[in-house]
Image (tube, helix red, strand yellow):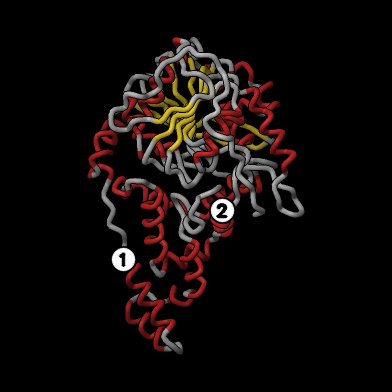
C-alpha cells in the first residue's frame, strides 16, 4: 500500500535503507560488547567496517520516548480508557474448516442499544482504538475486535488458513460470524455502526460488497445502520517498493537489525514520520511495533494480509484487474450511509483514494482533516469520537450531509463538522476520481 516515501515502512517496520546495512553488518551481530566490536573492526580491511560500527554505536542507543501518560494530548484519554468497564471474550469462527477464535474487547455496560464495532488495520490491534474509546466515554457500548493473527486473537499460520485466509473477504466472514454470535446473545439486536481504519475499513466495505457474504449474512448486515471509515483502503491500491520490503522481512534481518541496534532506531524514526505531530509518538506505540517484528508469527500474518489484500495473477505476479473491477462493482451493495474521513497529509493512502471511494459508494461523504496523516484515530482521537457521535446522530435523524459531498474540517473551532443537510444525492464535481496505478510486486 502506498506510503509516498518509498523508503519507510509505516508504523511498525524499518526503513529499507537500514535493511541494506543489516546485510552488510551480519558479522557484527556476534559482537556482544564494545571490546568485541573493536576487535571485529580491526580484523577487517579498510575503513568501511569501522564506519559501520561507529554508525551502529550512534544508533544503538535505545530511544527515549515518553509514556502516553506523559503526553498532554493523550494522558487524559488513556486514563479515561483505563476507567471504562471492559471484558475480553474469545468467539470461535470457522472458515475453510479452520476454527479461529477472535478476541472481542467489550467496553461499556453491554446493555446499550447502540454498539460501535471497531476494526483496526494491518500491523495494528484493537488497542489502537483506546484513545477514541476514552473520548467516547460511556455514550455507547463498544466491541473492539482483534482481527485473526492480531492482539489477543488466535494467530494461525497463513498456510493453514486455506485460500484467502487473511484476505479482506476471509477476515470479513469471521468478523460477521462474531457479530452474529454477539447479537444472538442480546434480548434485542443492537443497532450497529461499524468503524474501520485502513485495512479494517477495507474489511468493512468487503462485508457488504462481496456478493457471497452479502447474501449469506444479510440478516446481520441489516442491523448495521452506517459506516465510519478512517482512510479505508480501496480495492485499487498500490504495491510499492516499501510493500515489497515488508513482504521480504524475515527473522534473520530482524535479528541482525536488533543485535546491532539499528532496528529500534529505525522503528522510532518510522513512528515519528507516521505522525504530523511527532510529539504524539509514545513508548507504548514503540513497544507494540517492536513486539510485532520480534515475533515471526506476527510478521507472517502481516505479510499475509498485505499479499492477500488484492487479487493477483499467479504466474506473472501482476494485479488481476478483472477481479479488481468485479470487487469494485460490489460497492453498489454498500447501501448504508457512509462517512469517510481522511488526513490531508496521508502518505500511506493518498487523499485521492478518499475522493474515489466517496464517488464509488452509493451513499458516502468525505471529510478532510488538515494537518493529519494516516493514523487518524491516534493523531485526532477526539475529532474521531466527535465524527462518530455526530454521524450516528445524523443517521438516526435522517439528516446526513448529501452523498458525495466534501467538507474540510476546521481543527481549531470544529464548527464546520458535518453540517446537517437534506440535499439531494447529486455527484460532486470537486475532484476527478483517482485510480492509482498498481505496480507489480
Residue 158 spot, x, y in % from top left:
62, 47
Q: Is residue 89 visible?
A: no
3D distance between C-alphas at marks 2 and 1: 28 Å
- The residue at 50%/62% (across/down) is 16
Q: Which mark is residue 243?
A: 2
Establish if 102 lies above or below 373.
Answer: above
Disc nearer the start of the sequence (2/1): 1
Q: Which quadrant of the structure image shows residue 156?
A: top right
Residue 379 x %, y %: 35, 40
- Residue drawn at point x = 44 percent, y = 29 percent: 367
**Residue 25, image x, y percentages:** 47, 74
Residue 416 drawn above or below residue 237: above
* Image height of 260 relative to 157, above or below: below
State the quadrant of the C terminus. Answer: bottom right
> Residue 59 at what x, y percent from top left?
35, 67
Task: Determine the residue positioned at 57% across, 32% down.
Answer: 357
Q: Which residue is mark 1?
A: 61
Horizontally, residue 277 falls left or right of residue 266, namely left
Amino acid at each position: 500500500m502506498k506510503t509516498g516515501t518509498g523508503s519507510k515502512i509505516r508504523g511498525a517496520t524499518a526503513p529499507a535503507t537500514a535493511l541494506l546495512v543489516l546485510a552488510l553488518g551480519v558479522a557484527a551481530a556476534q559482537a556482544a560488547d564494545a571490546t568485541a566490536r573493536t576487535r571485529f573492526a580491526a580484523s577487517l580491511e579498510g575503513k568501511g567496517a569501522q564506519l559501520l560500527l561507529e554508525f551502529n554505536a550512534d544508533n544503538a542507543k535505545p530511544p527515549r520516548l515518553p509514556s502516553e501518560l506523559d503526553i498532554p494530548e493523550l494522558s487524559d484519554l488513556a486514563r479515561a480508557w483505563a476507567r471504562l468497564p471492559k471484558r475480553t471474550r474469545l468467539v470461535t469462527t470457522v472458515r475453510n474448516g479452520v476454527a479461529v477464535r477472535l478476541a472481542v474487547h467489550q467496553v461499556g455496560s453491554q446493555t446499550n442499544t447502540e454498539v460501535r464495532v471497531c476494526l483496526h488495520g494491518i500491523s495494528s490491534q484493537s488497542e489502537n482504538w483506546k484513545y477514541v474509546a476514552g473520548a467516547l466515554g460511556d455514550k455507547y457500548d463498544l466491541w473492539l475486535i482483534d482481527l485473526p493473527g492480531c492482539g489477543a486473537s488466535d494467530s494461525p499460520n497463513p498456510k493453514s488458513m486455506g485460500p484467502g485466509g487473511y484476505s479482506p473477504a476471509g477476515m470479513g466472514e469471521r468478523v460477521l460470524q462474531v457479530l452474529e454470535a454477539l447479537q444472538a446473545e442480546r434480548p434485542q439486536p443492537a443497532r450497529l455502526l461499524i468503524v474501520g481504519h485502513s485495512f479494517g475499513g477495507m474489511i468493512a466495505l468487503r462485508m457488504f460488497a462481496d456478493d457471497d457474504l452479502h447474501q449469506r449474512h444479510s440478516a446481520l448486515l441489516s442491523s448495521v445502520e452506517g459506516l465510519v471509515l478512517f482512510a479505508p483502503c480501496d480495492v485499487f491500491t498500490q504495491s510499492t517498493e516499501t510493500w515489497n520490503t515488508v513482504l521480504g522481512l524475515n527473522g534473520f534481518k530482524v535479528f541482525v537489525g536488533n543485535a546491532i541496534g539499528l532496528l529500534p532506531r529505525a522503528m522510532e524514526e518510522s513512528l515519528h514520520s507516521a505522525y504530523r505531530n511527532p510529539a504524539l509518538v509514545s513508548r507504548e506505540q514503540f513497544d507494540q511495533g517492536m513486539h510485532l517484528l520480534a515475533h515471526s508469527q506476527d510478521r507472517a500474518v502481516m505479510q499475509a494480509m498485505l499479499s492477500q489484500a488484492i487479487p493477483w495473477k499467479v504466474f506473472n505476479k501482476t494485479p488481476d484487474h478483472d477481479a479488481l473491477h468485479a470487487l469494485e462493482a460490489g460497492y453498489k451493495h454498500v447501501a448504508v450511509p457512509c462517512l469517510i474521513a481522511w488526513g490531508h497529509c496521508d502518505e500511506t493512502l493518498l487523499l485521492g483514494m478518499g475522493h474515489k471511494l466517496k464517488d464509488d459508494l452509493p451513499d458516502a461523504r468525505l471529510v478532510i482533516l488538515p494537518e493529519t496523516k494516516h493514523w487518524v484515530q491516534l493523531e485526532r482521537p477526539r475529532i474521531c469520537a466527535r465524527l462518530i457521535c455526530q454521524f450516528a446522530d445524523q443517521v438516526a435523524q435522517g439528516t446526513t450531509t448529501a452523498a458525495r459531498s466534501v467538507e474540510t474540517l476546521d481543527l481549531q473551532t470544529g464548527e464546520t463538522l458535518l453540517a446537517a443537510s437534506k440535499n439531494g444525492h447529486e455527484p460532486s464535481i470537486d475532484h476527478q476520481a483517482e485510480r492509482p496505478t498498481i505496480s507489480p510486486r
